[in-house]
Image (tube, rainbow, N blue to C red):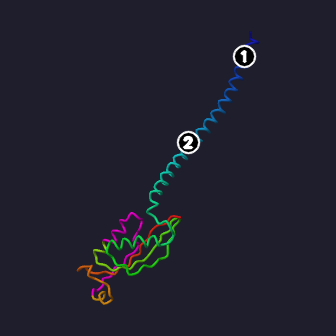
Amino acid sequence: MKKIIIPVILLFLFGIFIANIIYKNQTAGIKNIEANMSEERKKQSILGQIKEIEGKIKNYKPRLSDTLETHWLLENVSKMAGKAGVDLVSIKPVSSKQEGDYVFLRISLKVICGYHQLGNFISKLENSELFIKIDNMELKLVERSALVRSGVGVSKYAESPITETVLTVSAVYIK
């Protein structure tokens, strides 16, 4: 019987040894799989955030310039000036400014109007659904008599002081 017990004990110990090796290998494999799953969860979360941002960009796209040319900005600003009762005296392109993937299209406007019309025009620019920003504004009072002599009709400005205002406005184009 002693002859049988020793081989059985040795076989049992050998079985435990083999099971221990298999267990360690399986545990290492499980830890590796758990790490991969954690990494995949992070990737899925980031992909979800990217899709959300892409959706927002798609919603904002109509509010941005669809071209690198300033004609988009000129057209929209001219329409707003007309609705506000502002006289556009001159429009000049200003060099664009680039920051990363964004290009800021800029123009300089010289307008003549009363305070009320200027406020209305600024309100239309700043509250527009389009992304248009006023970068700079220089305001100067103008004598009515000087405007009358130059042929500019001033009757539409009532008794309000008349201003000659130079505005630099910009819009965004995304490459």
Q: Is residue 76 above or below residue 40?
A: below
Alpha-carbon span between mark 1 and mark 2: 44 Å
Q: Is residue 29 left or right of residue 81?
A: right
In the rendered image, which residue does mark 1 sit on?
8
Which dot marks residue 151? none
Q: Residue visible at 71% across and 18% down? A: 9
Foreground tag (1 vs 2): 2
Range covered by the magenta-colored residues: 120-144
Residue 68 in percent (x, y) is at 51, 70
| Magenta-colored stretch includes residue 122 | yes
Q: Is residue 104 above or below residue 91?
A: above
Q: Residue visible at 41% across and 68% down? A: 132
The amino acid sitting under disc 2 is Ser
| Magenta-colored stretch includes residue 149 | no
In the rendered image, which residue does mark 2 sit on?
38
Q: Is residue 32 above or below residue 87?
A: above
Q: Is residue 167 above or below residue 148?
A: above
Q: Residue visible at 33% across and 89% down? A: 150
Mark 1 element type: helix
